[in-house]
Image: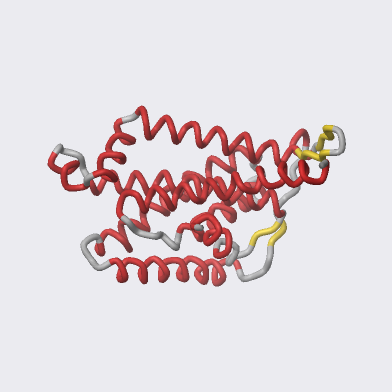
Amino acid sequence: MDQFLQQVVNGLSLGSIYALIALGYTMVYGIIKLINFAHGDVYMIGAYVGYFCMTILGLGVLPSILISMIVCMLLGVAIEKIAYKPLRNATRIAALITAIGVSLFLEYGMVFAVKANVRTYPALTGWFAKSFRIGNIHITAQQILILVVTVILMVLLQFVVKRTRVGRSMRAVALDRDAAELMGISVDRTISYTFAIGSALAGAAGILVGLYYNSINPLMGVLPGLKAFV
């Protein structure tokens, strides 16, 4: 029983990371019906941004998460404007091939920029390095951090989608794009907001995965991206 509960704790912490990545997939597909295969690689970029923030700039984990989310937000918008917007009225297969191309560009662009070596994520210090026991169940402060950050981001996302003008625009475009445009909603702007929010969540997930597995590499976004898609 203890082993089962331990695996539940491990599964919750890792599953919450996949949930953040999956939210980005779902949001983009709901708006423009595109499976954004580059999304997993945006998460990889987020992991590297966090790594450099913590090692070179000496920032803590929370400021690094914030910076990573901002960088990935800008990257997501740039990808949408440069790669996907010109194909807005193209066939689905053309958009899908483009998404795979963007994914490969990000992966091997990072291989060229930072090399293919596996990098070890910096160890957390202070409270974040602690671990706790509840009976025979081992819980680390990293797992608590992952769960707390995930819950906070999901609550904020729920607030944005349900309570803000941007969220209402996103729901309207997802429901009926043509009707939303007739009602004065800027579809292009709404799509950009969707990519920005989804990419920001992926950036946060990238750092959390780096902390969880303690290592990152330029191809790390492939398998988690597929798992989150499933």
Residue 90, horizontal then vertical, whole percent: 23, 66
Near-viewer residue (14 or 44): 14
Residue 133, horizontal then vertical, whole percent: 84, 34
Residue 200, horizontal then vertical, whole percent: 47, 45
Q: Residue at x 15, y 38 (%)?
A: 184
Q: Residue at x 74, y 37 (%)?
A: 141
Place residue 149 in its image quadrant: top right
Residue 75, horizontal then vertical, whole percent: 42, 54
Residue 34 as seen in the image, left or right of residue 217: left
Residue 69 as seen in the image, left or right of residue 147: left
Residue that lies at the very extreme toward the top in this rendered image: 163
Q: Give the quadrant of the N terminus.
A: top right
Residue that lies at the very extreme toward the left in this rendered image: 182
Near-viewer residue (113 or 186): 186
Residue 112 as seen in the image, left or right of residue 80: right
Q: Residue at x 62, y 34 (%)?
A: 148
Place residue 145 in its image quadrant: top right
Q: Residue at x 66, y 43 (%)?
A: 12
Place residue 115 in its image quadrant: bottom right
Residue 23 as seen in the image, left or right of residue 131: left
Does 144 appear above or below 206?
above
User: What is the number of callouts on the image?
Assistant: 0
Q: How is the image coloured?
A: secondary structure
Residue that lies at the very extreme toward the front in this rendered image: 1
